[in-house]
């Protein structure tokens, strides 16, 4: 868990928005359980995960993964709800967090301004690697959350 | 529909170590046969609209 995004001013979420936390380990376990009959799919999914963390800046991707988990309601805490006011975060980190939020909420309408801000901070290649890695991280969380919800897995 | 503005330079792709497993993962999913073709196509179209990816 990245420590830089912790913000004591982060408001507590309303109770009706809370879900039981789904830890990264829990995410892996849910994917492994439901893809046990499809080892080829699980293997490729895990290779993509490993590649994402090898290619992207780990602190940056970790921050964005935390924000994804907060938005999906599966994080242990909402450390990054006020990320925009957190002076400990860099301009690049804030650009990527803004991008991540739009990506999560309405990817088809992600603004040119948010994309340009990430490009200005990371450059073309690192931006493409970041967005591809974000896709991998987001997919795992959404798939695990969906299966946990539909099949009632222990989180 | 408005024309898209390229957001990165043409020819910029994810690094091969990431692009390959991503492609292989999608191919592995496509090879699955548990879901009937009509439902699969409905989901594919819904995802294409959601992602605006024109696939």
Image (spheres, grey):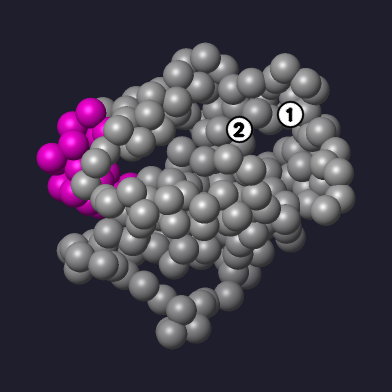
Looking at the image, is A141 positioned above or below residue B30?
A: below
Looking at the image, is A108 positioned above or below residue A8?
A: above
Output the chain of dot 1.
A
Q: Which residue position holds label 1?
A: A122
Q: Which residues are magenta?
A: A22-42
Q: Is residue A144 magenta?
A: no
Q: Position of residue A147 (x, y in %)?
A: 27, 59
Q: Position of residue A26 (x, y in %)?
A: 25, 51
Q: Position of residue A97 (x, y in %)?
A: 65, 49
Looking at the image, is B10 positioned above or below residue B1?
A: above
Q: Residue furthest front?
A: B38
Q: Give left or right: position of B35 versus B24.
A: left
Residue at screen point 43% across, 85% down: A16
Determine crowd level at label 2: few under 14, some 14-19, many 20+ residues with C-alpha closer than 10 A: many
Q: Are marks 2 and 1 on the same chain?
A: yes
Residue at screen point 79% across, 52% down: A111
Determine crowd level at label 1: few under 14, some 14-19, many 20+ residues with C-alpha closer than 10 A: some
Q: Which residue position holds label 2?
A: A130
Q: Secondary structure at mark 2?
A: helix
N-terminal label among 2 and 1:
1
Q: Nearer the viewer, residue B34 or A145?
A: B34
Q: Report the disc number at residue A150.
A: none
Residue at screen point 75% across, 38% down: A118
Specify whether residue A132 is in view: yes
Q: Quadrant of the C terminus of chain B?
A: top right
Residue at screen point 26% across, 67% down: A150
Q: Are marks 2 and 1 in contact (CB under 8 Å)?
A: yes
Looking at the image, is A24 positioned above or below residue A17?
A: above
Q: Residue furthest left?
A: A37
Output the chain of dot 2.
A
Q: Secondary structure at mark 1?
A: helix
């Amino acid at each position: 868990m990245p420590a830089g995004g912790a913000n004591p001013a982060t408001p507590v979420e309303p109770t009706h928005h809370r879900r039981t936390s789904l830890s990264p380990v829990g995410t892996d376990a849910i994917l492994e359980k439901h893809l046990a009959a499809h080892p080829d799919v699980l293997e490729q999914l895990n290779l993509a995960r490993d590649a994402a963390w090898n290619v992207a800046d780990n602190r940056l991707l970790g921050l964005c993964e935390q924000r994804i988990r907060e938005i999906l309601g599966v994080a242990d805490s909402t450390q990054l709800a006020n990320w925009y006011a957190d002076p400990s975060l860099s301009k690049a980190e804030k650009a990527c967090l803004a991008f991540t939020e739009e990506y999560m909420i309405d990817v088809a309408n992600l603004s040119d301004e948010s994309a340009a801000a990430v490009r200005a901070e990371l450059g073309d290649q690192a931006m493409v690697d970041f967005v591809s890695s974000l896709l991998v991280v987001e997919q795992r969380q959404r798939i695990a959350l969906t299966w946990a919800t539909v099949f009632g897995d222990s989180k | 529909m408005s024309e898209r503005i390229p957001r990165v330079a043409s020819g910029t792709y994810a690094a091969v170590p990431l692009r390959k497993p991503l492609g292989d993962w999608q191919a592995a999913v496509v090879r699955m046969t548990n879901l009937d073709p009509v439902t699969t196509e409905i989901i594919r179209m819904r995802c294409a609209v959601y992602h605006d990816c024109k696939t």
